[in-house]
Image: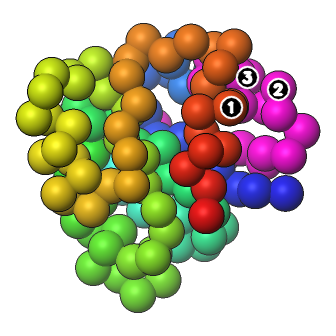
Amino acid sequence: MAKVLYVDDEADIREIACLSLELDPSLEVRACASGAEGIAVATAWQPDLILLDVMMPGMDGPSTLSHLRDAPETASIPVVFITARVQPGESDNYIALGAVGVLAKPFDPMTLAEQVTAFLP
């Protein structure tokens, strides 16, 4: 079973994403409401993939990714950014920061699990 951590400050989107991902019985899903909480859970739980919202108050997605990369326990966990900002060039920017991919918001709840499993190592 693959472990997926979803980090997003919006409770409604977190709930929809988790329900969508849990439709796939091969995925175990946990969710966090902030970058700091995401780092703590990632360190303890060691997910196979982290889905990370770009725009969050306090610590945004790119800052969270930077902290994850700086810690030996989380440095190799693949991260996919989830964002409404997917203009040409922005996705390339997120990949340059170290993300393995970018998914657009709003996402299709019926295909989210399929999209996510494509990023699993």
In the rendered structure, are the residues bearing label 2 and label 1 in contact, judged by CB atoms less than 8 Å apart? yes
User: Tag 2: residue type?
Assistant: Leu
Residue 98's place in the image compared with 32, above or below, is below
Q: Earlier in the sequence, mark 3 or mark 1?
A: 3
Q: Earlier in the sequence, mark 2 or mark 1?
A: 2
What's the distance in space between the residues labelled 2 and 3, CA to CA? 7 Å
Start-end of magenta stretch: 16-34
Note whether residue 58 is visible. no
- Is disc 2 placed on a helix, strand or loop? loop
Q: Quadrant of the C terminus?
A: bottom right
Rendered image: mark on residue 73: none
User: Tag 1: residue type?
Assistant: Ala
Q: Position of residue 10 (x, y in %)?
A: 42, 21
Residue 3's place in the image compared with 6, above or below, is below
- Is disc 1 placed on a helix, strand or loop? helix
In the rendered structure, are the residues bearing label 3 and label 1 in contact, judged by CB atoms less than 8 Å apart? no
Q: Position of residue 20 (x, y in %)?
A: 70, 22
Q: Position of residue 79 (x, y in %)?
A: 42, 55
Which residue matches tag 1?
113
**Of 112 and 73, the residue lying toward us:** 112
Which residue matches tag 2?
23
In the rendered structure, are the residues bearing label 2 and label 3 in contact, judged by CB atoms less than 8 Å apart? yes
Which residue matches tag 3?
19
Note whether residue 115 is visible. yes
Few, some or many residues within 10 Å of mark 1 (<14, 14–19, 20+): many
- Identify the residue shown where x is 10% and y is 35%: 89
- Identify the residue shown where x is 71% and y is 56%: 3
User: Tag 3: residue type?
Assistant: Leu
The answer to if 79 sits in the magenta stretch is no
What's the distance in space between the residues labelled 3 and 1, CA to CA? 10 Å
